[in-house]
């Protein structure tokens, strides 16, 4: 067996809620509690993955698979991205990631990054959490083996990008196609390693939106939102789908 590319040691300070995270030849990271421990660990791991696979175009995005196609859900913190993912997993979608989308710009396939789904709040009662959900001081984590529809473990062709905006008070969700220029700018703003790619990441963003469909998604109640997303994917024209795939 080959040695691991990354190796971490986690220690808990005796008699306290604090932790330390140690990686070889690196200054220890100190976390005040379990929530901060997971935040610091995932942040460090994400940065190191980008260094190990700088050929991939990393986007801060959730990714799901439906009918053999991948879709990105891109949104600011608080936009309801992870809650929307949790709901979609009950409606025939499969999980690649809730935070990280590593895109191969040559094949336009998204590599899976199936770590535990992280929620900041309890979802609606119609989408209950499993008993094995891990509760920290600030977050809720659903292990991948307890996700409703399972995970995808192979790269999936990217077909569509949804830019999320939460409208809990709206009477219903809405989907609006947007131009490639707007989508490219929005996507670039969520790129994690743009400087590793030509044009400071702009070329990669342009290539992704050139070959996919892009939409603004205003979310409302979750069942209706899931239905709208599913109908949008099914309604992609054959020509546009072929460009995406």
Image (cartoon, rainbow, N blue to C red):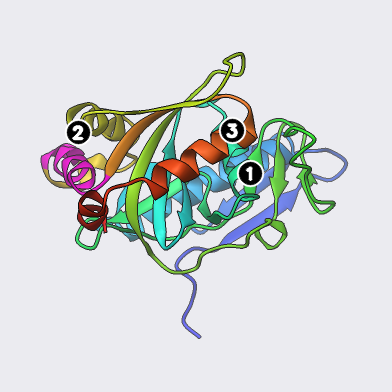
Describe residue 176's horizontal placement relative to residue 35 as left or right: left
Q: Nearer the viewer, residue 144 or 158?
A: 158
> Could you tell me what secondary structure mostly forms the magenta stretch?
helix
Read off the magenta span: 199-212
Q: Position of residue 177 (x, y in %)?
A: 30, 30
Tell me which residue sits at (58%, 45%) in the image: 88
Q: Nearer the viewer, residue 87 or 199?
A: 87
Q: Residues within 10 Å of mark 2 (few under 14, many from 20)?
A: some
**Is residue 26 visible in the rendered structure shown here?**
no
Label 3 to label 1: alpha-carbon separation:
14 Å
Residue underneath mark 1: 86
Label 3 to label 2: alpha-carbon separation:
26 Å
Describe residue 52's horizontal placement relative to residue 23 as left or right: left
Q: Is residue 81 above or below residue 147?
A: above
Q: Nearer the viewer, mark 3 or mark 2?
A: 3
- Say which element carries label 2: helix
Residue underneath mark 2: 180
Q: Is residue 226 above or below residue 189?
A: below
Q: Nearer the viewer, residue 32 or 47?
A: 47
Q: Position of residue 14 (x, y in %)?
A: 84, 45
Q: Position of residue 146 (x, y in %)?
A: 72, 58
Asked if residue 207 is among those painted magenta in the image, a careful observer would answer yes
Residue underneath mark 3: 224
Tell me which residue sits at (70%, 50%) in the image: 142
Which of the two labelled residues, at mark 3 and mark 1, occupies the earlier sequence position? 1
Q: Position of residue 141 (x, y in %)?
A: 70, 46
Q: Residues within 10 Å of mark 3 (few under 14, many from 20)?
A: some
């Amino acid at each position: 067996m080959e040695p691991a590319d990354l190796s971490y040691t986690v220690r808990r300070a005796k008699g306290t809620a604090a932790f330390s995270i140690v990686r070889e030849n690196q200054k220890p990271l100190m976390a005040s509690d379990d929530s901060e421990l997971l935040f610091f660990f995932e942040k460090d791991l994400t940065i190191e993955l980008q260094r190990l696979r700088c050929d991939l175009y990393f986007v801060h995005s959730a990714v799901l698979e439906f009918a053999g196609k991948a879709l990105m859900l891109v949104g600011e913190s608080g936009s309801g991205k992870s809650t929307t993912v949790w709901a979609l997993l009950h409606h025939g979608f499969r999980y690649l990631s809730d935070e990280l989308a590593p895109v191969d710009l040559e094949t336009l396939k998204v590599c899976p990054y199936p770590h535990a789904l992280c929620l900041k709040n309890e979802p609606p009662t119609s989408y209950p959490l499993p008993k094995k959900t891990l509760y920290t001081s600030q977050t809720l984590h659903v292990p991948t083996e307890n996700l409703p529809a399972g995970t995808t473990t192979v790269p999936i062709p990217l077909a569509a990008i949804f830019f999320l905006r939460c409208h809990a008070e709206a009477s219903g969700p809405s989907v609006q196609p947007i131009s490639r220029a707007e989508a490219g700018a929005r996507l670039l703003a969520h790129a994690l390693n743009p400087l590793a790619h030509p044009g400071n990441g702009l070329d990669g963003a342009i290539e992704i939106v050139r070959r996919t469909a892009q939409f603004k998604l205003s979310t409302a109640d979750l069942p209706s939102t899931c239905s709208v997303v599913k109908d949008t994917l099914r309604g992609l024209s054959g020509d546009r789908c072929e460009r995406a795939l």
